[in-house]
Image: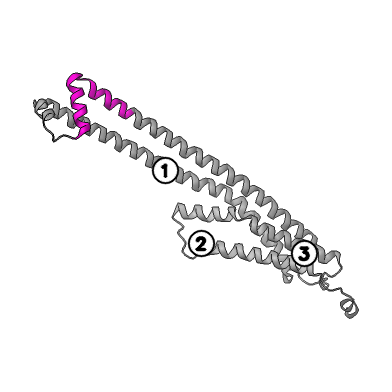
Amino acid sequence: MTASKSTQRPVPLAAQFLKLVGILLLLTFLVEWSVLFITPQFNNSQWQLTVVNQFIERGATPLIGFVFIYTGFWIQAVSGSATQPEPGESAFRDWRFWVFVLSSLLGLLCLLGIPLYLSITGQITEQAVNQINQEAAQAEIRVEQEQQQIKQLASSGQLQQLLKSNQLPPDQRAILEQLQKDPQALDKQAGQARERIRSQQQEAVKRAQQEAFVNRLRVGIRSFLLAVGFITIGWSGLREHR
């Protein structure tokens, strides 16, 4: 055993630098992502979405870190400077084992993040659609109230006096003048206003759903690719480490 240790070659600087950079990239990602859990809001959909987005959007950083670490191990093994484990020594005592386990776990988190992201975005999209529908309903109520007010003014018998006065807002004056010429004008304008509100409502709902679909597709594909990368590195390292 002493002879084997004395003939062991020194670790190449390239391997040391690669492993160092890889570890720093990995720690940077874990620290930045862990900061989000200092003030957790597990019942807040937006906070949940931020956590998943941060993990997926920055997932390339630890992936590159694992590639550097794996490459460093490979250079060390090729150069003959890799430390050989003692006979019967447990793999759990080797930090390289835990690096590859962590890579596999991150890959699993990426896979689990896909249905989680779909669920969260579904809730947020539903809330946005409900908000759009509520605003459209309130806008129609305002149109109905304005229509009733103008009808009351027109039926009060004081239409001429109101038109001669300077107390009416310009928009109401224009409507009353048109109503004087065409009794059906108010209903036509109210109908057109409702059509505009419903058209804008449909466009807003469609836009929200399309945006959610694009985000789901983008994050889903990215998360799946990251999972493939993490799991490939983790399992390859664990297989070679046995």
Q: Is residue 9 above or below residue 59?
A: below
N-terminal label among 1 and 2:
2
Do the numbered discs 3 and 2 sit on residues whose CB atoms are within 8 Å? Answer: no
Q: Earlier in the sequence, mark 3 or mark 2?
A: 2
> In the current view of this chain or complex, which residue is farthest to the bottom?
2
Whether residue 242 can be seen here: no
Q: Is residue 133 above or below residue 175?
A: below
* Count of marks placed on residues: 3
Q: Nearer the viewer, mark 1 or mark 3?
A: 3
Q: Amino acid at mark 1?
A: Ala
- Assign a secondary structure to mark 2: helix
Main SS, magenta residues = helix
Please tell me the numbered disc located at residue 212: none
Q: Which residue is tagged 1?
A: 128
Which contiguous range is marked in magenta? 169-194
Residue indicated by mark 2: 36
Residue at the spot 62% in from the left edge and 52% down from the top edge: 110
N-terminal of the pair, mark 1 or mark 3, is 3
Tell me which corner region of the image, top left, top right, bottom left or bottom right, holds residue 164. top left
Q: Nearer the viewer, residue 120 or 8?
A: 8
| In this picture, residue 224 sits left or right of residue 17 | left
Closer to us: 201 or 193: 193
Q: Amino acid at mark 3?
A: Gly
The answer to which of 198 and 178 lies nearer the viewer is 178
- Secondary structure of the residue carrying numbered label 3: helix
Residue located at (22% from left, 30% from top): 147
Q: Would you identify the image quadrant in which residue 165 lies?
A: top left
Q: Position of residue 78 (x, y in %)?
A: 85, 64
Residue ID for mark 3: 72
Q: Amino acid at mark 2?
A: Leu
